[in-house]
């Protein structure tokens, strides 16, 4: 009996692995894309900031012995200042003498060298950035400043590394998709029920505009407090949830095809956003609103990305572990069989459209936070990109199939393609064309595989 | 009719076909002469459908020869098969429901001049075809509006319009009433006399003896026997299909009927159901029969809350039930095994476990989270007690056989603690060996006190399985037979047809 039971119950990790493989195709595509863009953007990189300072100090230690004197030269930018500071500190701790630290233009460097030369300070090296090392002022040093006759010009060694794979760029990729990905959570649910929600782009604008006007008119505009901001954001999301619920009512009670119902709601919501905003943008919000859109959270990951990760974990749990999730798949797989099995079909559809409205609203909050404003022009055509992400992620427009993980991968695939094309200098018009073909290709591939199974 | 010594119209020989993981056909054979009806028999999964799909050009065989009039052919596509004179009439007819009969007849082969076709010409040809078949169908009727039997005639007419010489009929009588079956047979005899060869696929053995000349029996993708029907009897045919001796078609049962369980009073809905009252007691199996369209299924759907009645009341164990949705019925202990498992009973995209849990999540979940271990444990219990053959609980129900799918639906309802089982055509599409298993299960359930209302058009099944028979005619209960043991098929039919 027990051995039989064990056979009937594959371990949960086996199931998880199987689910992963089911989403594998697009993971493979994603990895291939990353590999391609890593290769295509492989180029000389210059270290910057603190890291550059430390590595240059090591480099100096390998060619010169303390306590020789080193002159530090950099531009007066923030990044260069950090470079110079860390370099100076590192050199001192290694026992070198820092003859001087110049933050400025070639003229400043010349004056510093002149002064040191007059004082007869012998410098063994000039430590600078790759950028400044090319300054003409460093040419012909023995002739111009005899005490620098033996000085080496040292700067952090460049290294070859793909621009695509730089941490800053990778974060940029993820940051770009946060808004799409958040909206795609609701869209995935709607598409799994066999429906579609065209109103999400308008709802992004609607939520941003409503929240911004709430802040401007009721929470004290630029002087709004944190609590009031949160209340305004929640109110904006609530408005979008109600609009989503209205779409759901059109689909369930009036039995309109989801395409038509949400097409109508898309126009209504967009018009509503324009009216609320009086055709303009609303900027009267405090600086703190960028806390979500631009703030960096723990582990150096932007807060918006954290929000996305947490939402996806929750959505995944809901879809795979809860009664609601099972019902959503059942309604999409076979509405009649679901109804005859006692699934509250209408309630599920209402909830799903409401969730889609809410996630579009949340997307609007993130976008508004990134752009520090609310405007009715936000979210234009977003519905199409979001639908593309969901479908590339393996959901079927016929319903019953799709996963949250897949959608996230789909969104990443689209973001990586866009980012890669930006890095390799493809113009925006061509980008659109390429993206269109990529969507067709990805879905065709999926259909082909499915037909063969 | 069989012209001995002549070259056969169709010869299929040594046909092999494998799908990933399955050898669907192994040395399959079939010979068809002009003017002959050959029955293609076998349990579900025996390979009949695959063989037909090979013939229709839908599948390419891995090996084997197909000869038409003695000439070897390679059937490249369904279009090519049509050009070779092969026409397949599938169970789920292939007509475009929104087009007219005439448009369907000539679809894809419109004779046109410069892109325009002559309606008048097509209409005349359609009339000729129907005249030949001796059926009365308006060529301008929209197909959707025709009853299934007439749609089938349109399919046959379409085959004739394509000058088909080999016609395959897949379960042609599944949705027909007895009278309609008779007129179909008349048409088949007429086709025979015109030298057309027919391959007849059916689960209804009685029909095989009525209309077929020879029988080809398949099992596990292999050819088992080809025999003249005159040399066979029902028992022998079943043995050939099942591969072992079968003692009885229906299990013996001991009935222990208790108190009234399901009581329905005055159910009405439109013209389909008029003032139907019925009761089913604990441990009783009541058969509800009648011609197709007499309102049997509609009654069951109302009892289950799937359709709302215009009037009527329902109570289970004395408690009044609202009839607003299946949810209400399930909560009240009523469940339905629908005739069409694939579209109504199961969500094919979900796994066995997920389907099983669907109506049971309220008690298999905590705070909205599904208790998957418990769910698997409960399912495991039914897998053993009902003998469901599955590889594992996470398998997709799509790949299960008809009998196992039926058992999954049953398991789901038993877990929902159902007291009343409405079963619509319990064994439709289920092969002979599995049928017996389903009958045994029904008996066990009745013995456990469950009240069963069985809807069936198979009269042997009605007579063999029930304690009481209710016969419907045009939306009303036309009669009741309480002494089932001495009842005859004629008696039931007399009530059903008036």
Image: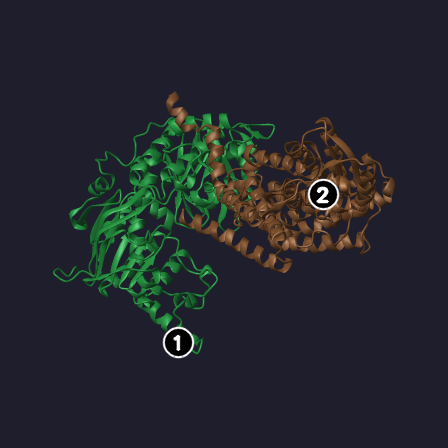
Chain colours: A brown, B green
Let me know if residue A320 appears in the view: yes
Q: Nearer the viewer, residue A138 or B399?
A: A138
Q: In this view, does B218 lie to the left or right of A308?
A: left
Q: What element carries label 2?
A: helix
Q: Can residue A232 be seen in this view?
A: no
User: Of residues A344 and B459, which is closer to you in this image?
Assistant: A344
Q: Residue A366 carries which label?
A: 2
Marks 1 and 2, Cα distance to the nearest angstrom? 66 Å
Query: Could you tell me which chain the residue with mark 1 belongs to?
Result: B
Whether callout 1 and callout 2 share a subunit is answered no
Kindly report which numbered mark, 1 or 2, lies closer to the viewer in this rendering. 2
Identify the residue under disc 1. Answer: B121
Question: Among all residues in the image, which is located at the extreme left?
Answer: B5
SS label for mark 1: helix
Up-down relation of residue A374 to residue B401 (above or below):
below
Q: How crowded is mark 2: few (under 14 residues within 10 Å), some or many (20 or more)?
A: many
- Name the residue nearer the viewer: B300 or B22: B22
Q: Residue, x 34% and y 47% (percent of image)? A: B493
Residue B210 on image: x %, y %: 24, 52
């Amino acid at each position: 009996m027990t051995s039989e039971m064990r056979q009937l119950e594959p371990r949960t990790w086996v199931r998880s692995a199987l689910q992963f493989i089911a989403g594998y195709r697009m993971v493979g595509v994603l990895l291939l894309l990353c590999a391609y863009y890593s290769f295509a953007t492989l180029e000389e990189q210059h270290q910057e900031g603190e890291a550059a300072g430390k590595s240059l100090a090591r480099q100096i230690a390998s060619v010169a012995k303390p306590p020789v004197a080193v002159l530090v030269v950099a531009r007066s930018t923030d990044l260069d200042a950090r470079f110079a500071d860390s370099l100076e500190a590192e050199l001192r701790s290694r026992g070198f003498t820092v003859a001087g630290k110049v933050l400025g233009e070639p003229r400043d460097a010349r004056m510093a060298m002149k002064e040191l030369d007059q004082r007869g300070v012998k410098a063994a090296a000039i430590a600078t950035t790759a950028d400044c090392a090319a300054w003409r002022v460093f040419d012909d040093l023995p002739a111009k400043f005899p005490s620098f006759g033996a000085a080496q010009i040292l700067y952090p060694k460049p290294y070859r590394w793909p621009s695509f794979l730089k941490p800053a760029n990778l974060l940029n990729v993820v940051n770009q998709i946060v808004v799409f990905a958040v909206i795609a959570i609701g869209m995935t649910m709607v598409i799994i029920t066999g429906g579609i929600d065209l109103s999400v782009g308008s709802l992004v604008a609607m939520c941003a505009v409503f929240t911004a006007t709430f802040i401007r008119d009721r929470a004290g505009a630029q002087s709004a407090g944190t609590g009031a901001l949160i209340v305004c954001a929640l109110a904006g999301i609530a408005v979008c949830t109600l609009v989503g619920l209205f779409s759901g009512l059109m689909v369930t009670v009036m039995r309109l095809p989801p395409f038509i119902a949400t097409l109508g709601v898309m126009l209504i919501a967009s018009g509503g956003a324009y009216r609320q905003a009086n055709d303009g943008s609303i900027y009267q919000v405090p600086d703190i609103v960028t806390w979500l859109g631009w703030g960096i959270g723990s582990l150096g990951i932007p807060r918006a990305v954290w929000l996305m990760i947490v939402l996806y974990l929750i959505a995944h749990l809901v879809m795979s572990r809860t009664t609601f999730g099972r019902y959503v798949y059942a309604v999409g797989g076979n509405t009649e069989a679901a109804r005859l099995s006692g699934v509250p079909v209408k309630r599920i559809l209402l909830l799903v459209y409401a969730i889609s409205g809410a996630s579009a609203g949340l997307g609007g909050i993130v976008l508004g936070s990134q752009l520090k404003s609310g405007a009715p022009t936000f979210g234009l055509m977003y519905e199409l990109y979001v639908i593309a992400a969901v479908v590339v992620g393996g959901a079927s427009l016929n319903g019953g199939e799709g996963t949250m993980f897949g959608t996230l991968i789909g969104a990443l695939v689209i973001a990586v393609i866009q980012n890669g094309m930006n890095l390799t200098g493809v113009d925006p018009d061509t980008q659109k064309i390429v993206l269109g073909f990529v969507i067709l290709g990805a879905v065709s591939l999926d259909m082909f595989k499915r037909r063969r199974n | 009719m069989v012209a001995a010594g002549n070259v056969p119209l169709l010869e299929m020989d040594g046909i092999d076909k494998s799908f990933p993981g399955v050898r669907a056909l192994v040395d399959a054979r079939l010979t068809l002469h002009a003017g002959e009806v050959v029955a293609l028999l076998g349990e579900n999964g025996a390979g009949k459908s695959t063989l037909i799909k090979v013939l229709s050009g839908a599948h390419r065989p891995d090996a084997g020869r197909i000869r038409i009039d003695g000439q070897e052919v390679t059937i490249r596509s369904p279009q090519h098969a049509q050009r070779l004179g092969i026409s397949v009439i599938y169970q789920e007819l292939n007509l475009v429901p929104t087009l007219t009969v005439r448009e369907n007849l000539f679809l894809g082969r419109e004779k046109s001049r410069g892109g325009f076709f002559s309606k008048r010409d097509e209409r005349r040809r359609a009339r000729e075809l129907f005249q030949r078949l001796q059926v009365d169908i308006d060529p301008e009727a929209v197909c959707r509006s025709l009853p299934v039997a007439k749609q089938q005639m349109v399919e046959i007419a379409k085959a004739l319009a394509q000058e088909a010489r080999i016609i395959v009929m897949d379960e042609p009588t599944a949705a027909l009433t007895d009278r309609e079956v008779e007129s179909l047979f008349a048409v088949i005899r007429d086709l025979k006399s015109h030298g057309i060869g027919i391959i007849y696929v059916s689960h209804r053995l009685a029909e095989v003896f009525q209309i077929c000349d020879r029988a080809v029996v398949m099992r596990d993708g292999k050819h088992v026997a080809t025999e003249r029907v005159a040399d066979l009897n029902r028992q022998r045919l079943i043995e050939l299909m099942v591969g072992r001796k079968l003692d009885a078609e229906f299990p013996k049962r001991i009935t222990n009927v208790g108190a009234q369980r399901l009581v329905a009073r005055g159910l009405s809905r439109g013209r389909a159901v008029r003032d139907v009252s019925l009761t089913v007691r604990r441990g009783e199996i009541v058969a509800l029969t009648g011609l197709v369209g007499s309102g049997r299924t509609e009654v069951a759907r109302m009892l289950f809350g799937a359709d709302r009645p215009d009037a009527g009341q329902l109570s289970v164990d004395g408690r009044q039930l609202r009839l607003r949705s299946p949810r209400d019925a399930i909560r009240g202990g009523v469940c339905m095994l629908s005739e069409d498992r694939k579209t109504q009973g199961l969500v094919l995209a979900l796994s066995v476990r997920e389907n099983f849990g669907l109506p049971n999540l309220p008690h298999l979940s905590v705070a909205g989270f599904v208790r998957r271990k418990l769910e698997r444990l409960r399912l495991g219990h039914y897998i053993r007690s009902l003998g469901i053959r599955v590889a594992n609980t996470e398998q997709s129900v799509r790949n299960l056989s008809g009998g196992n799918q039926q058992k999954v639906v049953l398991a789901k309802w038993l877990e929902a603690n159902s007291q009343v089982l409405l079963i619509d055509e319990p064994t439709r599409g289920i092969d002979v060996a599995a049928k017996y298993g389903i009958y045994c299960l029904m008996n066990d359930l009745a013995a456990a006190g469950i009240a069963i209302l069985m809807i069936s058009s198979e009269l042997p099944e009605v007579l063999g399985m029930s304690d009481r028979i209710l016969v419907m005619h045009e939306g009303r209960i036309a009669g009741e037979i309480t002494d089932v043991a001495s009842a005859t098929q004629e008696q039931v039919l007399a009530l059903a047809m008036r």
